[in-house]
């Protein structure tokens, strides 16, 4: 007894519908996986940027107060103190010739070096020797528009006022 053409057509339609349902399910799972990764990355970038903006704000305050309090202290002492304010664990920095990295530990007051994790590995750097600058993990640019004003980032929603600080 052979299958009629109608039965074969129904089996083919059933198989096609099952394959389409599986494909849609796999696409939805893939989309959700990528969506979660992108959202996590964006939130991580925003948190890193806000951390840098807070540190910049502290450094601005330190820079405003330190010269008056220091009197005739030597410049390298003030520079080291400013580096301790600017470059704290977790800050995203960019170093000339090394690229972007994350501060993994700040040195002691005596030597003032930092350990920074780059794509090629961790390095110990002296911020008075290697030019370091805070950088937005999302690629934004920081700006300071005047005395008494909060630092800003060019990326939307990367703002201390949005963070409630």
Image: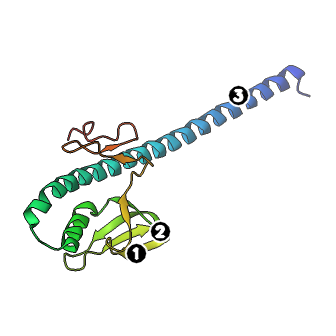
Q: Badge 2 is on which residue?
A: 98
- Give the image quarter of residue 135: bottom left
Disc nearer the start of the sequence (1/2): 2
The dot on residue 31 is none
Looking at the picture, tell me which residue is in the foreground, 5 or 165: 165
Does 21 sit above or below residue 142? above
Disc nearer the start of the sequence (2/3): 3
Q: Position of residue 49 (x, y in %)?
A: 34, 49
Q: Say what secondary structure mark 3 lies in.
A: helix
Q: Badge 1 is on which residue?
A: 123
Residue drawn at the location 21% of the way across and 53% of the way down: 60
Q: Position of residue 3 (x, y in %)?
A: 88, 26
Q: Badge 3 is on which residue?
A: 17
The span from disc 1 to disc 2 (Cα, nearest Å) is 10 Å
Q: How packed is label 3: few (under 14 Cα within 10 Å), some, or many (20 or more)?
A: few
Residue 1 visible within the image: no
Give the residue at the far right of this rendering.
2
Q: Say what secondary structure mark 2 lies in.
A: loop
Q: In front of the other: label 2 or label 3?
A: 2
Q: How packed is label 1: few (under 14 Cα within 10 Å), some, or many (20 or more)?
A: some
The span from disc 2 to disc 3 (Cα, nearest Å) is 54 Å
Residue drawn at the location 26% of the way across and 41% of the way down: 160
Q: Are marks 1 and 2 in contact (CB under 8 Å)?
A: yes
Q: Position of residue 65 (x, y in %)?
A: 12, 57
Looking at the picture, tell me which residue is in the foreground, 133 or 44: 133
């Amino acid at each position: 007894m052979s299958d009629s053409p109608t039965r074969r057509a129904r089996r083919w339609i059933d198989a096609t519908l099952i394959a389409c349902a599986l494909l849609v399910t796999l696409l939805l799972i893939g989309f959700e996986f990528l969506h979660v990764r992108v959202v996590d990355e964006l939130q991580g970038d925003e948190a890193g940027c806000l951390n840098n903006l807070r540190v910049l704000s502290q450094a601005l305050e330190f820079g405003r107060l330190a010269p008056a309090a220091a009197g005739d202290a030597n410049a390298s002492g003030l520079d080291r103190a400013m580096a301790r304010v600017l470059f704290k664990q977790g800050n995203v920095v960019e170093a000339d010739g090394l690229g972007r990295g994350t501060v993994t530990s700040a040195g002691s007051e005596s030597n003032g070096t930092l350990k920074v994790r780059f794509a090629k590995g961790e390095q110990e750097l002296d911020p008075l020797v290697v030019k370091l600058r805070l950088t937005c993990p999302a690629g934004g640019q920081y700006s300071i528009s005047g005395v008494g004003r909060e630092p800003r980032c060019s990326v939307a929603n990367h703002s201390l006022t949005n963070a409630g600080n």
